[in-house]
Amino acid sequence: MAPEVQGNEYCFCCGADNDRGLHLVFDYPEEGRAETSLLIPEWFAGWKGITHGGLLSTLLDEAMAHACMHAVEGAVTAEMTVRFKKPLPTAGKALIRGRLVETRGRVMSTLGQILDEAGTVYAEATAKFMVTKLKS
């Protein structure tokens, strides 16, 4: 079951009311995991035909944040490290996955990946999220 998220309607990544947003829809195959996909438009290029690293970082951050949503009502990114494995071509479909690894007090550790449909990993990230609101 998908977690309920309050106040995200204008989120650049997943907000339904953001006219310029990506309108990502996440699936939650199990608690602590979040997945989505995106057909990367050409206008998200850094160099011709290659997806901009800033967009990849944004997608990883969003997937890892969504992975935290089963456990808490609110959390913000405190720290993130991205490893770019190889250039992701534009005009292709990217699979974006986030996973909650552990929670210690108010700090949640996560992992994220961006892959293509064949399973090739293009970018990976680790992040720590700071809990801002526990579930009631």
Image (tube, grey):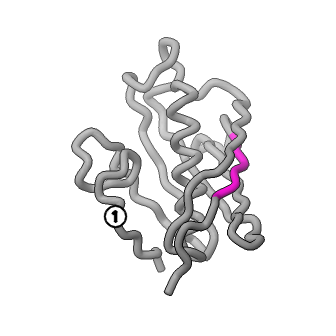
Q: Main secondary structure of the magenta part?
A: strand
Q: Residue visible at 44% across and 44% down?
A: 38
Residue named by callout 1: 7
Residue farthest top in this picture: 48
Q: Which residues are magenta?
A: 124-129
Residue 122 on image: x %, y %: 66, 35
Q: Is residue 126 magenta?
A: yes
Residue 21 on image: x %, y %: 32, 43
**81 or 104, nearer to the observer:** 104
Q: Is residue 47 magenta?
A: no
Residue 52 on image: x %, y %: 52, 25
Query: Is residue 63 among the parts visible in the rendering?
Result: yes
**Is 115 positioned to the left or the right of 1 in the image?**
right
44 is higher (above) or lower (below) than 47: below
Q: Residues within 10 Å of mark 1 (few under 14, many from 20)?
A: few
Picture quadrant where residue 53 is located: top right
